[in-house]
Image: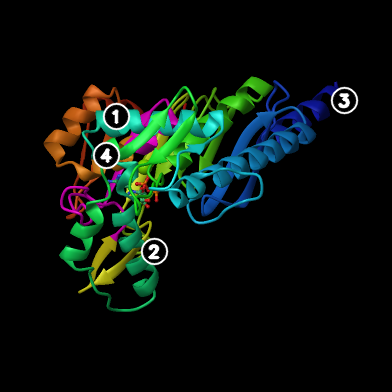
């Protein structure tokens, strides 16, 4: 009897402190840096640490692979990547791997669907903003690029001049000076691919986050709760370090991706000049501080977070609905708005619980 009691106590202690459930699953967490300019973290429930380490190592390798493939600044040995394509603009079609071709086809489909709002051929314009950000991000006062400079660059951003030849698997930017920037989709696309690969390998109860681009798979297997919990960062955290998260979401088998004005920016007259550019005005879109998208596929969530950021609220809500996504917007005055279906996942506004 005494023995039974001791083992019962041990079991309770084990549940309390190590996160291991009666199922024998334990929660592990690991992270790595060096890809997509951000930290990638993996939380998963498995039986043995050794298995988790294997999955984490695999994820790192695959993120590295996609990082190199989608890089527009660096070339790598034996890799034909976005930079190779850009360097050959106006010169010659570039033969690319199946993976890069499939990704670019995906990007071009969404460029068309979004009516050019998310345009990966916007490179020449984004490049100017990138340079200004680099120059001014650590200074108190920055400058804006001249409208004429942006307009001149915009002459080289026509997505119709991105030629994808499926038969020869080549990509050709038809004019010299054109360039691709896949920053709006790359991280989400990689997260979705790597997440699904891990799932196929046998890791099923996990969540992977690439710099806040979160993809949750099957429910936490530990037994203590039945949903993944994801917090939405307060866009004012830099100015108010104690600011509470905007909300907490409880969900499984979905992605949560946020685009915000706090991710990359510099200041002009105290105003944040950030990195999401309205391709029609050629200036940063200023309808919101942040947009959070909930939808299954992480690549879709990533591109939607950029797209819905650029649209005014009525159009953004309509687009979210058409795309089968739920979303939350933080407006410049810190008020919030959301799609009806968002509430199902929301703790603060819909009363959802972790279970
Ligand atoms: P982050 O990747 O920082 O989380 P986003 O997913 O919103 O943020 O993507 C922003 C990135 O997308 C920018 O850094 C830039 O490379 C690119 N970008 C910005 N505006 C556009 C646009 N209108 N169309 C396509 N790409 C864009
Ligand atoms: Mg995005």
Q: Which residue is mark 3?
A: 3
Rendered residue at 71%/40% (across/down):
57
Q: Residues within 10 Å of mark 1 (few under 14, many from 20)?
A: many
Tell me whether circle 3 and circle 2 mark residues in contact (CB < 8 Å): no
Give the camera-side residue of 88 and 213: 88
Q: Residues within 10 Å of mark 2 (few under 14, many from 20)?
A: few
Residue 299 lies, with reference to residue 310, above or below; the image says above
Q: Which residue is mark 1?
A: 326
Q: Which residue is mark 4?
A: 307
The kind of secondary structure element at disc 3 is helix
- Return the x and y of residue 106 as percentages of the image width and height: 40, 29
Rendered residue at 63%/28% (across/down):
198
Q: Residues within 10 Å of mark 3 (few under 14, many from 20)?
A: few
Q: Is residue 234 left or right of residue 354?
A: left
Residue 233 lies, with reference to residue 202, above or below; the image says below
The kind of secondary structure element at disc 1 is strand
Give the camera-side residue of 62 and 90: 90
Q: Is residue 196 left or right of residue 50?
A: left
Disc 4 residue: CB within 8 Å of ligand 2: yes
Residue sticking out furthest to the bottom: 140
Viewer-nearest of labels 4 and 1? 4
Disc 2 residue: CB within 8 Å of ligand 1: no
Quick check: can you spot residue 323?
Answer: yes
**Quadrant of the image where one finds ligand 2:** top left
């Amino acid at each position: 009897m005494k023995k039974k009691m001791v083992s019962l106590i041990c079991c309770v202690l084990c549940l309390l402190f190590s996160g291991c459930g009666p199922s024998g699953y334990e929660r592990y967490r690991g992270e790595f840096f060096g890809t997509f300019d951000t930290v990638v973290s993996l939380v998963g429930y498995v039986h043995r640490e050794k298995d988790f380490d294997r999955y984490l190592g695999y994820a790192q390798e695959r993120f590295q692979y996609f990082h190199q493939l989608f890089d527009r600044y660096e070339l790598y040995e034996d890799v034909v990547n976005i930079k190779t394509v850009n360097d050959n603009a106006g010169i010659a079609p570039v033969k690319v791997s199946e993976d890069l071709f499939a990704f670019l086809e995906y990007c071009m489909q969404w460029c068309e669907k979004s009516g050019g709002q998310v345009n990966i051929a916007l490179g020449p314009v984004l490049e100017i903003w990138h340079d200004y950000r680099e120059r001014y991000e650590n200074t108190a006062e920055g400058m804006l690029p001249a409208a004429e400079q942006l307009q001149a660059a915009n002459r080289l951003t026509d997505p119709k001049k991105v030629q994808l030849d499926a038969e020869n698997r080549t990509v050709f930017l038809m004019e010299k000076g054109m360039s691709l920037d896949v920053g709006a989709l790359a991280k989400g696309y990689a997260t979705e691919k790597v997440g699904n690969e891990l799932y196929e390998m046998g890791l099923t109860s996990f969540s992977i986050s690439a710099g806040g681009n979160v993809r949750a798979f099957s429910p936490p297997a530990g037994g203590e709760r039945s949903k993944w919990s994801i917090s939405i960062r307060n866009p004012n955290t830099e100015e108010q370090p104690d600011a509470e998260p905007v909300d907490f979401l409880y969900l499984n088998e979905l992605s949560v991706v946020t685009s915000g004005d706090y991710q990359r920016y510099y200041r002009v007259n105290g105003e944040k000049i950030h990195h999401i550019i309205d391709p029609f005005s050629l200036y940063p879109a200023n309808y919101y501080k942040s947009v959070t998208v909930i939808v299954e596929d992480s690549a879709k969530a990533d591109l939607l977070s950029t797209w819905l950021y650029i649209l005014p609220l009525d159009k953004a809500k309509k687009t979210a609905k058409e795309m089968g996504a739920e979303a939350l917007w933080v407006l410049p005055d810190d008020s919030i708005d959301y799609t009806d279906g968002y509430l199902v996942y929301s703790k603060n506004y819909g009363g959802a619980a972790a279970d």
